[in-house]
Image: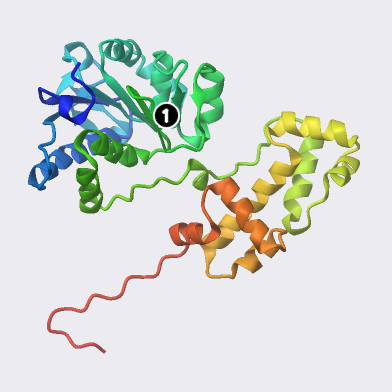
Amino acid sequence: MADETLDGYVHAMRVQVLVLRDCTTFVPVGYADLLRKSVALAASLPLSRPPPQIRVSLVSAGTRREVLGAGGVRVVCDSVLSRTERADLVLVPALDPDVLSHLELNRAVVPWLRRAFLGGSVIASACTGAFLLGEAGILDGRSATTHWAFQPLFRERYPRVRLHPEAIVVDQGRVITAGGATSFLSLALYLVERFLGPEVARAASRMFLVDVNKSPQSAYAMFATQKTHGDEAILRAQDLLESDLADSPSVPELARRVAMSPRNFVRRFQRATGNSPRDYIQRLRIEAAKRGLEGGPRPLSVIAGAVGYRDVVAFRRLFHRWTGLTPSEYRTRYGPRTPPALVKRAGSRAR
């Protein structure tokens, strides 16, 4: 394989984008489109040295060039797995929400990915595409990330992988993984920067109106209260915590109300929910505060007080710990948008 540095490619860099069976087709098509247009954009920029030429192709994960994606969308690919030439870079899109069934549906990709990696290809995945890399053994002993909602399943299935739950993109040289579903845009721009250079990546970000989001995944992760564990006493404790966030019972009080010793209560709560009672309370409050910040311009002191924090400075620190953003950054990014001003028609008079 050609060297991975920008000046190492003596031939046109070959990029293969997998199109998985029953996948959301905008991901592989979006990959290919953004990369192809970035190559064209690079040619128009006054760069200090010419970027490598990149040839992008779509590869069907099935036996036919036409792939049927989610919702019946059909994509005609350039090639199929059995007829591909060696690639410099392989891009793997997300498996759709039923990850394990879609993993089996696209099982033929696993040995193909392993061969591509052993043959020298750089492999990059978006979102739950990391499960295919995990199945191929490509991630064993390496760091990786995947969508926050599927991280428990990923950890259970691939214990030899060092999972970085907060990361949007993890680059391990010849293996690159990206987090949530639309993080393929961040990954595509990251690859543009790596292989075409930062000037092209900045220009592409402006041209395609894609914000290169480097916030951790915890800024997006909704805290789903874990209630499928079957421990009735802990379920009662969870209900007590959620009923009054501003004045939640203390851990000793919770233990007393569900007839346990504090030590036994903490142990069972951790085992049932995966969180200590203290962390669980904090996360519940931060999620409620996020909804408050999203909903309108209420002062931060009011929002903090409504979820049990009188010290606004301490609340800011806690919010940043759990989300990776300050409250003001979160409100700017996810709060109500100001409606755009009406466009004045040419020749019309303002009223």
Q: Residue placed at 69% from the left, 58% from the top?
A: 307
Image spot of residue 278 (x, y percent): 74, 43
Q: Which amino acid type corresponds to the residue marked 1 in the rendered image?
A: Thr
Image spot of residue 50 (x, y percent): 10, 37
Q: Residue placed at 76% from the left, 48% from the top?
A: 241
| Residue 59, image quadrant | top left
| Residue 172, image quadrant | top left
Quick check: 267 above or below 133? below
Q: Viewed as shown, does residue 279 lie left or right of 172?
A: right
Looking at this view, is 125 or 105 the one in front? 125
| Residue 82, image quadrant | top left
Residue neighbourhood size for the residue with mark 1, other residues' Cα within 10 Å, grouped as few (<14), some (14–19), many (≥20) = many
Q: Residue placed at 68% from the left, 48% from the top?
A: 282
Looking at this view, is 95 or 194 the one in front? 194
Image spot of residue 326 (x, y percent): 53, 56
For the N terminus, give its image quadrant.
top left
Residue that extends furthest to the front in the rendered view of this protein: 48
For the C terminus, give its image quadrant.
bottom left
Residue 77 visible (yes or no): no
Q: Which residue is mark 1?
A: 128
Element marked by disc 1: helix
